[in-house]
Amino acid sequence: MNLIKSFLKEEDGMGTVEIVIILAVLVSIALIFRKTIINFVRTNLESILSGSGDAGTIDSNGVGTE
């Protein structure tokens, strides 16, 4: 019984739980905005690889503009 009480009072695992929750929130945000993120990365990579030097901007629909 004392083992169970000490386990419940132990706070060493709280850091791990917090990290897991933060990662879950970040993954959720990435999934929600995945189209915008993909368009942003694609536009910037195309600009960098083509050597134009102008990365362009992202409009409110998440579409890259030059």
Image (spheres, helix red, strand yellow):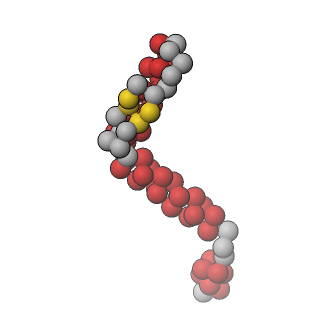
- Of residue 1 and residue 45, the one placed in the foreground of this image is 45
- Residue drawn where x is 62% and y is 77% of the image: 7
Q: Position of residue 51 (x, y in %)?
A: 52, 13
Left or right? Give the position of 31 relative to 7.
left
Q: Position of residue 6 (x, y in %)?
A: 66, 81
Left or right? Give the position of 31 relative to 54.
left
Q: In this view, does 21 lie above or below 48?
A: below
- Of residue 7 and residue 16, the one placed in the foreground of this image is 16
- Residue drawn where x is 57% and y is 64% of the image: 18
Left or right? Give the position of 63 relative to 20.
left
- Of residue 33 and residue 44, the one placed in the foreground of this image is 44
> Which residue sits furthest front?
66
Residue 64: quadrant of the picture: top left
Q: Position of residue 23 (x, y in %)?
A: 51, 54
In this rendering, the count of numbered labels is 0
Q: Where is residue 32 in the image (x, y as percent from the top left)?
A: 35, 50
Q: In this view, does 35 lie above or below 42?
A: below
Residue 16: quadrant of the picture: bottom right
> Which residue sits furthest top?
50
> Which residue sits furthest bottom?
1
Q: In the rendered view of the protein, which quadrant contains the N terminus?
A: bottom right
Q: In the rendered view of the protein, which quadrant contains the C terminus?
A: top left
- Of residue 64 and residue 8, the one placed in the foreground of this image is 64
Q: Is residue 45 above or below residue 10?
A: above
